[in-house]
Image (cartoon, rainbow, N blue to C red):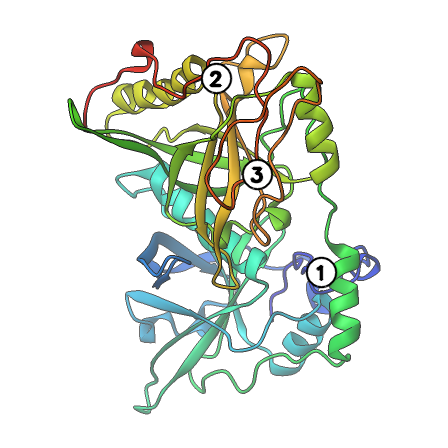
């Protein structure tokens, strides 16, 4: 059978991740892969807020063993579901593949899709879901003998994206099982997880890995002007994908101003060093059908924070069901010595526990703001406005 270099899995130790691939993963002069199927990969589910979400990407499947794939028996859409048990270590998956000998196919984005960037983003979203959740996908359909079964196991592979292990005649015989204790598995995962790196405000956060795409939305009711809403479509890149837990974020981050003003850069840096959040950089989604309008609303959010001297916070339900403020969003080029044109907003995320406290300016001349129950106080800076009202310069069109 053909072989491929498997990607490191979050459940295995760092020593396992760096061991060289073995036997089936290092064949001698394998035949080149050829396209065997084109269709859609579709996952349907709900986000943490309970809102239905569908991710669909148009792909081409290629294999080095066309006959073993029996691609003529596959449906036009592979409907994906997560496996009941988590992913296993790289070596365990390799041993399983040696034993069961599936037909291997690699999936790549279909270059003929009418919206290539959006299709690629959906493809990457499926990859990110597998990595962050540490599970596999399976897809089921009716075999030639009339039996409905799970017939493909899909997993992420380094430098190759999504790979499928197909059993088109018999169905998956059994799933790979990790032969180590659950306690050892937990410890190995903790050892392999990268620590959160505090953001250095003297340098922009590196736009490392795409972790999320969705909307940033601010709205306010006014008796004079009615409902004002600003919505922009963005993508978020994270310094550490695993620390972001982006699979727990809602599709829309609903923004509200902090009760109290921003703090000096030095105070913010001290806070970041102490709380060590997951950091993401927001940029406009270039696949939006009206890029100019989307860019205008993105810039409006930046201008609103500057004009009101406030940060944004976003709230949603944590995995434990608790509703809390989990992200603090700020304009990055207001803090850096040199303006950054592409990255103007950053978010610091606490996706598992919520924001522990908000940054404070320790200067002794400050007076705390009155705040709502359950929200940590941010002290006034000297000369800060006494009232939290919107600046006229932040006015934008009602959507």
Nearer to us in this view, 314 or 19? 314
Q: CA distance from mark 2 to mark 1?
A: 63 Å
Residue under label 3, please give it: 376
Depth check, mark 2 against mark 1: the one in front is: 2
Task: Assess whether mark 3 and mark 2 are in contact (beta carbons under 8 angstroms).
Answer: no
Q: Is residue 27 visible?
A: no
Depth check, mark 3 against mark 1: the one in front is: 3
Image quarter (top left, top right, bottom left or bottom right) of the C terminus = top left
Name the spot of residue 193 as percent of width and height, x first: 72, 53
Q: Residue at x 57, y 81 (%)?
A: 175
Query: For this view, does 259 lie left or right of residue 201?
Result: left
Give the mark nearer the N terminus: 2 vs 3: 2
**Dot 2: few (<14), some (14–19), or many (≥20) neighbours within 10 Å?**
some
Task: Assess whether mark 1 and mark 3 are in contact (beta carbons under 8 angstroms).
Answer: no
Residue under label 1, please give it: 28
Question: In what element is the residue under mark 1?
Answer: loop
Q: CA distance from mark 2 to mark 3?
A: 17 Å
Give the mark nearer the N terminus: 2 vs 1: 1
Residue under label 2, please give it: 309
């Amino acid at each position: 059978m053909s072989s491929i270099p498997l990607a490191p899995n979050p459940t295995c130790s760092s020593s396992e991740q760096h061991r060289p691939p073995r036997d089936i993963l290092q064949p001698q002069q394998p035949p080149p892969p050829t396209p065997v199927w084109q269709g859609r990969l579709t996952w349907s589910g709900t986000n943490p807020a309970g809102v239905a979400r569908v991710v669909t990407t148009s792909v081409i499947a290629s294999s080095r063993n066309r006959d073993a794939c029996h691609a003529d028996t596959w449906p036009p859409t592979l409907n994906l579901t997560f496996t009941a048990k988590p992913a296993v270590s790289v070596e365990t998956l390799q041993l399983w593949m040696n034993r069961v000998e599936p037909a291997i196919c690699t999936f790549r984005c279909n270059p003929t899709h009418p919206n290539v960037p959006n299709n690629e983003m959906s493809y990457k979203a499926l990859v990110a879901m597998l990595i962050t959740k540490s599970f596999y996908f399976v897809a089921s359909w009716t075999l030639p003998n009339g039996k409905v079964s799970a017939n493909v196991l899909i997993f992420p592979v380094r430098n190759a994206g999504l790979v499928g292990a197909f059993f088109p005649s018999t169905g998956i015989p059994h799933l790979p099982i990790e032969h180590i204790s659950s306690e050892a598995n937990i410890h190995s995962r903790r050892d392999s997880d990268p620590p959160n790196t505090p953001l250095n405000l003297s340098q922009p956060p590196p736009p490392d890995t795409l972790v999320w795409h969705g909307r940033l939305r601010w709205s306010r009711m006014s008796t004079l002007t009615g409902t004002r809403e600003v919505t922009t479509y963005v993508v978020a890149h994270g310094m550490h994908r695993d620390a972001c837990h982006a699979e727990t974020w809602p599709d829309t981050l609903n923004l509200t101003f902090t009760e109290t003003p921003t703090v000096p850069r030095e105070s913010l840096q001290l806070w970041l060093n102490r709380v060590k959040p997951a950091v993401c950089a927001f940029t406009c989604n270039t696949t939006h059908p009206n890029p100019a309008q989307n860019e205008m609303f993105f810039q409006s959010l930046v201008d609103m924070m500057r004009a009101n001297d406030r940060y944004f916070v976003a709230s949603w339900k944590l995995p434990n069901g608790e509703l809390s403020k989990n992200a603090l969003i700020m304009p990055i080029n207001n803090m850096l010595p040199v303006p950054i044109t592409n990255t103007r907003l950053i978010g610091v995320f606490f996706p598992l526990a919520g924001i522990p406290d908000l940054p404070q300016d320790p200067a002794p001349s400050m007076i705390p703001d009155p705040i709502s129950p359950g929200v940590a106080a941010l002290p006034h800076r000297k000369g800060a406005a006494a009232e939290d009202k919107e600046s006229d310069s932040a006015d934008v069109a009602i959507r």
